[in-house]
Image (spheres, helix red, strand yellow):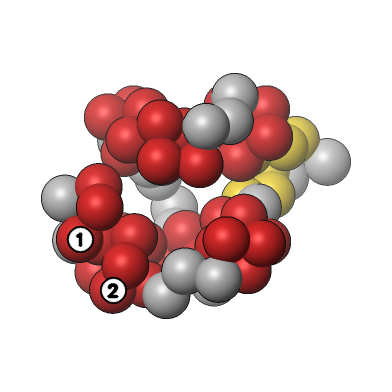
Amino acid sequence: MIRCHLARLMGEDKLRIADVARETGLSRNTITLLYKETTQKVDLQAIDKLCLLFDCRVGELLEQS
């Protein structure tokens, strides 16, 4: 199983879904699915944009457990 740490990263920076959508250009739906860890697939471009926004590596955003 792959865990997504988007909720934690957003909490640390006190960002809302709307803030992340505005900063990355990703849809609110994409961010919500990642935030709730209910997404079935993720576009590589979305991962790249989130890593740039949070200044993190892929392993800090996604983790295989």
Q: Label 1 amino acid?
A: Arg
| Most foreground residue, 49 or 39 | 49
Residue 18 pos. (x, y %): 28, 73
Local SS, label 2: helix
State whether residue 55 is above or below residue 54. Answer: above
The quadrant in which residue 58 appears is top right
Which residue carries the number 1 mark?
22
Q: Which residue sits at x=42%, y=75%?
A: 16
Task: Tell me the quadrant of the picture where the N terminus can be found.
Answer: top right
State whether residue 36 is above or below residue 5. Answer: below
Residue 5 pos. (x, y %): 65, 52
Which residue carries the number 2 mark?
18
Question: Are circles 1 and 2 on residues that touch, CB within 8 Å?
Answer: yes
Q: Which residue sits at x=62%, y=55%?
A: 9
Q: Which residue sits at x=47%, y=59%?
A: 34
Q: Residues within 10 Å of mark 1 (few under 14, many from 20)?
A: few
Q: Label 2 amino acid?
A: Ala
Local SS, label 1: helix
Task: Tell me the quadrant of the picture where the C terminus can be found.
Answer: top right
Q: Which residue sits at x=31%, y=67%?
A: 19
Residue furthest front in the image: 13
The quadrant in which residue 8 appears is bottom right
Cα gap from disc 1 to disc 2, whole angstroms: 6 Å
From where the camera sits, is residue 47 visible? no
